[in-house]
Image (cartoon, rainbow, N blue to C red):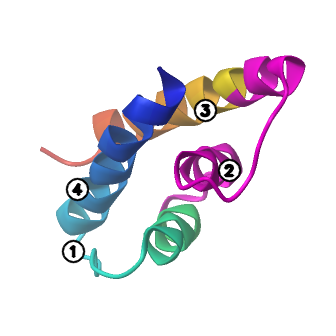
Amino acid sequence: MLVSAISGLVVLARTLLRLAGREDSGSTAAVLDRVETKFNVSAANLRKAWRLKRGEIRVTGAEMDMLYQGVLEEFQRLVQVVDALPA
């Protein structure tokens, strides 16, 4: 489930940059870097989940639980960023 959801979370990150008037193109890593910088949030777990989806890394069951929790926390932080954007 996490691996299939990560693409949508990257779309959210790109959209946040667009709404903030920032560059939203480029690699996923570059987009996540810009989100971290612009909104002062961590995207380390999103980045790790993206690498997992691409087959660049493997994680064990316990690591997957921690990664899932980390992605959820980062997603919740991005939702807070959306809520704080001016209307």
State the CA–CA distance, disc 3 to disc 4. 18 Å
Q: Which mark is residue 8?
A: none
Q: Nearer the viewer's eye, disc 2 or disc 3? A: 2
- Marks 2 & 3, CB-CB < 8 Å contact: no
Most foreground residue, 2 or 87? 2
Q: Nearer the viewer's eye, disc 3 or disc 4? A: 3
First along the sequence among labels 1 and 4: 4
The type of residue carrying mark 1 is Gly
Image location of residue 83, percent across then percent down: 31, 33
First along the sequence among labels 1 and 2: 1
Q: Which mark is residue 48?
A: 2
- At 23% from the left and 56% from the top, the residue drawn is 15
Q: Secondary structure at mark 3?
A: helix
Q: Which residues are magenta?
A: 39-67
Q: Secondary structure at mark 4?
A: helix
Quarter holding the C terminus is top left
- At 73% from the left and 30% from the top, the residue drawn is 67
Q: Secondary structure at mark 2?
A: helix
Within 10 angstroms of label 4, few (less than 14), some, or many (20 or more) residues?
Answer: some
**To which residue does mark 4 refer?**
15
Within 10 angstroms of label 2, few (less than 14), some, or many (20 or more) residues?
Answer: some
